[in-house]
């Protein structure tokens, strides 16, 4: 584990090749600690929200000293903000205006089935009102408006309603697991349910076409 130690003190007595090897090892260990902290934080925040999360639990799950959360991220708020930035980046990478709208939304659904923690983080953010993690929906709404103007989507439903409906249907399996069991008779993590839900959601989204 790399702690908040002065690396220069470690490297100074070494010859140049050994110094490079040691520096590479320290960098790799540092990146490993950061990665484990972010993964552990994602688990804890997804389970308990920002208010319920404790830095000690995050550190324990990551297997590192909790002081490293301050060292790498500046504390609990910093690591939470970093998760928010990474979530926004992953969402941006899924956006493709060339895809049909139904395929675009189903891409988000599949991504969330692969890792539902982001959905739970977003839900906690909505419930607890942490605006620093939120971004305006201007671009998404503009994309829906464009699709309506070009005749891909029906304009009988407002862009805002189309967007909110799509988000709700994508997030529902992860936020309402008990309802999924009661209504579908299956668990949201079951591959069969995920396959059927994806197919059914595709049919619903195609009803939005012009």
Image (cartoon, grey):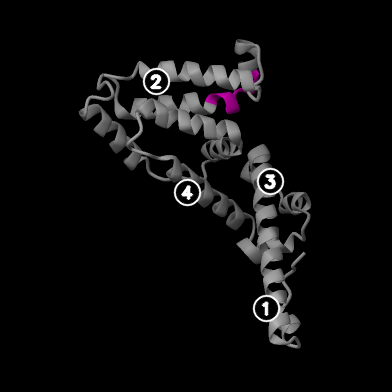
Q: Is residue 183 above or below residue 152?
A: above
Q: Does residue 111 appear to the left or right of 12 in the view shown?
A: left
Question: Are circles 1 and 2 on residues that touch, CB within 8 Å?
Answer: no
Kindly identify which numbered label has been placed on residue 53: 3
- Residue at which label 1 appears: 20
**Front tag of 4 and 3:** 4
Q: Residue visible at 27% across and 30% down?
A: 147
- Residue at which label 2 appears: 205
Kindly identify which numbered label has been placed on residue 150: none
**Front tag of 1 and 4:** 1
Q: Which residues are magenta?
A: 172-178
Q: Does residue 33 appear to the left or right of 85 in the view shown?
A: right
- Residue at which label 4 appears: 89
Q: Does residue 114 appear to the left or right of 29 in the view shown?
A: left
Q: Earlier in the sequence, mark 4 or mark 3?
A: 3
Q: Percent from the top left, x then y, of residue 74?
A: 62, 63
Q: Residues within 10 Å of mark 4 (few under 14, many from 20)?
A: few
Q: Earlier in the sequence, mark 1 or mark 2?
A: 1
Q: Earlier in the sequence, mark 2 or mark 3?
A: 3
Q: Percent from the top left, x then y, of residue 109?
A: 51, 29
Q: Quadrant of the N terminus?
A: bottom right
């Amino acid at each position: 584990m790399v702690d908040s130690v002065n690396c220069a003190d470690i490297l100074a007595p070494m010859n140049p090749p050994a110094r490079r090897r040691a520096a590479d090892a320290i960098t790799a260990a540092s990146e490993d600690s950061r990665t484990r902290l972010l993964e552990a934080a994602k688990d804890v925040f997804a389970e308990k929200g920002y208010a319920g999360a404790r830095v000690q639990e995050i550190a324990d799950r990551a297997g590192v000293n909790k002081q490293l959360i301050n060292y790498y991220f500046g504390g609990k708020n910093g690591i939470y903000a970093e998760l928010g930035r990474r979530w926004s980046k992953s969402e941006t990478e899924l956006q493709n205006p060339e895809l049909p709208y139904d395929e675009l939304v189903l891409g988000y659904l599949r991504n969330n089935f692969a890792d539902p923690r982001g959905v739970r983080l977003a839900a906690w953010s909505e419930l607890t009102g942490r605006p620093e993690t939120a971004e305006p929906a201007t671009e998404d709404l503009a994309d829906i408006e464009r699709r309506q103007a070009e005749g891909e989507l029906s304009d009988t439903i407002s862009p805002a309603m189309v967007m909110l409906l799509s988000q709700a249907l994508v997030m529902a399996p992860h936020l309402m697991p008990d309802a999924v069991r009661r209504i579908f008779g299956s668990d949201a993590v079951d591959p069969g349910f995920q396959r059927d839900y994806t197919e059914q959601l595709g049919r619903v989204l195609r009803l939005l076409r012009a």
